[in-house]
Amino acid sequence: MTTNDHDTTNDDLAARSANEDTSEPVGCPEWCDDLTAFLYDDLDADREAEVRAHVSTCERCQAELQSAQSTTRLLDTWSIEEHTWRQDNDDVGLSIGHPKSQAGAWNRFRPWWAGGIAAAVFFALFVMIGAQVEVQNGAFRLTIGTPTAVENIKQPTGAFAGDAEIVLTRFRNVAGEEADSRIETLLNTLEEYLAEFRRKEESRRLSLAQAVDRRIHEERLEHRLQLQALAQQLLFESSQARGAINEIRTHMVAEEGATVQDDPASLLDREGKAKVTEDTTTNMQ
Amino acid sequence: MDVPDSQLIADAQAGDNAAMSLLAQRWQGRAYALAYRLTLDRSDAEDIRQQAFLRVQRAIHRFTDQATFSTWLYRIVLNLCRDHGRSKQTRSRAMQVVGERSEVCGKGLGDTSLPEQHETNRRIADAMGLLPTVIHEIVIMRHYQGLKFTQIAEILDLPVSTVKSRMTVGLRLLRAQLEDIAP
């Protein structure tokens, strides 16, 4: 590692800081570092015996050791978040100073008051929104909001009871019609949403089908062009072959004096080739 | 009986992924704990742990027996902590965030019923964050990771006497910071 220079600088700084900041008693300089190692049980047996013997006779080092011990006891209490790996590696350094019983006590304690608070908040919300629960014919009915004015009207009595009953019935009818109207409006809105959704889906489906058709058309066109190019190439090669055949035939005629009157293209098939060979043989005879 | 690290390393060098996995499983907790104590940040520590084992996996074929696996791993973790600058950032922002960290730590252990412990956690984390890096690392490795001074000296490539000296200074600095709450 290459941190020695940097470390040395920081070490000196830290040492100076320690000497400036610390008002604690300092033990014998030649023993201090081994006192720390002694505290952490990190000395070999011989050196440990020497330190023990020295401390028993040196008040300064006793004070230093006690001071360091109280500091390490305090450090033991520093807790950090536990991690799931603790189950696999119990000595990972996350559990120092934190008995599991604390977490267990917390888990045992939490449900009681947490559940109580949740229930209280829920009840308060329930009351605030005016919710009511009724049981009708064995089924629960939840009502949110205050009851309608129509339902709160008491049954009319007296001389105008009949007229009042008529008015009340009208109110109830009006309320029912209003509710029906709202439901109908909601249903209409829902229908509109559904129609819009279907229209968009249909539009998407159509555009998708068009895209597929377009792609198929493009691929067909591409194949057709490829076939045309292939046909042209075949034609070209065919004309080259005809030229070669004519050249061969001319050469043969010149050499053998044979007269070939049929179409040179007949040489392309086996039958034609056989015919030419036969004619040539006849002429030679 | 557990397979020794040396055997796992040899198997991993031969391309045995299961051995590499077992090695990571065995050491990831310690790597995470060291990174967490140094950074005081759970997500940073998790990142550093993952990066450390990625480096281990990539370089396992170059590992030799000149150093123990733990020494190698701790060096990687310390270097990653330094590279991330988390220790310095933590120190500079310790005063601002240490309360929040301690609060999270406290809640993790459910010490909301023990406000004095919560305050102690906050003070200790604060004091740790104010230590110089070279001392902070040693205090964490010796006190919370339980490493011997010789191991720490090997990891940091320092003489054992220097490590002991820095630990002594670290304890004195912490004592000075925490004098009013020390037992």
Image: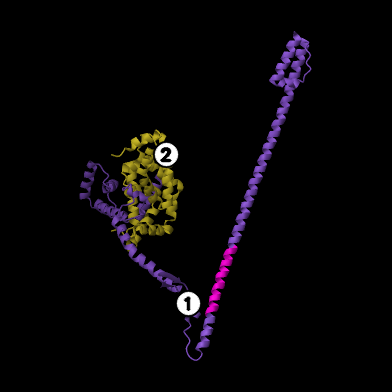
Chain colours: A purple, B yellow
Relative placement, left or right, of A10 versus A38 is right
Q: Position of residue A135 (x, y in %)?
A: 41, 72
Q: Nearer the viewer, residue A221 or A170?
A: A170
Q: Nearer the viewer, residue A151 or B67?
A: A151
Q: CA distance from mark 2 to mark 1?
A: 70 Å
Circle 1: residue type: Pro
- In the rendered image, residue A182 lying in the magenta stretch gets the answer yes
Circle 2: residue type: Gln
Q: Is residue B158 visible?
A: no
Q: Chain of mark 1?
A: A
Name which quarter of the figure residue A97 lies in. Answer: bottom left
Q: Position of residue A27 (x, y in %)?
A: 27, 50
| Residue assigned mark 1 | A147
Give the magenta-colored segment's residue range.
A172-192
- Quadrant that contains the N terminus of chain B: top left
Dots 2 and 1 on the same chain = no
Q: Is residue A153 visible?
A: yes
Element marked by disc 1: loop
- Residue drawn at x 31%, y 61% is A108
Vertical arrangement, residue B135 with respect to residue B182, above or below: above
| Residue assigned mark 2 | B57
Residue most extreme to the bottom: A159
Mark 1 crowd level (few <14, some 14–19, many ≥20, 10 Å Cα):
few
Q: Position of residue B141 (x, y in %)?
A: 34, 47
Q: Chain of mark 2?
A: B
Vertical arrangement, residue A258 with respect to residue A115, above or below: above
